[in-house]
Image (cartoon, rainbow, N blue to C red):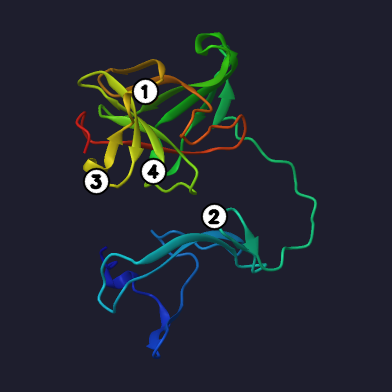
Amino acid sequence: VNPMPEYQQTLIESGISQDATTTTMAFTKIMVEPGEIPILAGQNTFLGAWGSSNTLGIHSNRQPFGLDLTTGLFVDVINGNGGGVPPPAQQEPPAQVDNNLAAVNQDGFTAVNLQGQLQGSTLQFRVNLNDANAGGEDTVTVVYTIPQVAWCAIAVSDNGGFMIGSEAIIALPDTGEVLKYNLDAKSVPGVVPMPENQQTLIDASVTQDGVSTTLTFTKLMVEDGEIPISNGANTFLGAWGSANTLG
């Protein structure tokens, strides 16, 4: 947890006050600043946290929440409920698809060029309904290519995209191992392979050339005790390292 450089310390009229039972923080922030996450006039995701004393340490309470700054609508992104006053119903314009980002190829895979911190990587996926290779269960086949010779991973999340609590498929190129993991912490000791009976990936592999790494697997979409993948909207996480060793 590191302070930003002095030139980024642009808060206006910031302050903190306490009484016997509560602490109040107040500040004004520029919504769009170079090199920082922008705050929108509409929907945003924030995190709130507090500690057990006035000394900075591990938080005793924390939770992400959605807040629309235009309507005041609050959304509990963990439990999926909300409050506040919803905006008046409006006709939404049809969604626009950038054909440079997503396209379906002749094998039925949808290919997506990922953006942001994952720019340069490509995710291809295909839903296989009633997959004969999985006893008639529905599966999804994923091909994830990164622009790096390194370990890589795809995770599924049901907590708004936070690493901890998500479930990952991680490829280790030096051994060729591709396994499912529970993400219990951000440190390597907290990245724990699932038990053997949950290692149900089909045709999982990892390959490398001189400049890229490709992870391929087929996964059951619904498995006992695991985060389900729907044939619709899902939240995934992508990641890769700087070398083939997980770290």
Cβ–Cβ below 8 Å for labels 4 and 2? no
Circle 3 residues within 10 Å: few <14, some 14–19, many ≥20: few
Judged from the image, the secondary structure of the residue bearing numbered disc 3 is loop
Residue type at numbered disc 3? Ser
Q: From the viewer's perspective, is the residue at label 1 or at label 2 nearer?
A: 1
Spatial CA distance of label 3 from label 4 is 20 Å
Q: Earlier in the sequence, mark 1 or mark 2?
A: 2
Q: Which image quarter: residue 109?
A: top right
Q: Secondary structure at mark 2?
A: loop
Viewer-proximal residue, 69 or 198? Answer: 198
Q: x, y (%) of residue 148? A: 29, 29
In the picture of the structure, the residue carrying the numbered disc 3 is 187
Left or right position of 135 against 90: left
The residue under label 4 is 117
Dot 1 crowding, Cα within 10 Å, few <14, some 14–19, many 20+: few
Q: Is residue 27 above or below residue 44?
A: below
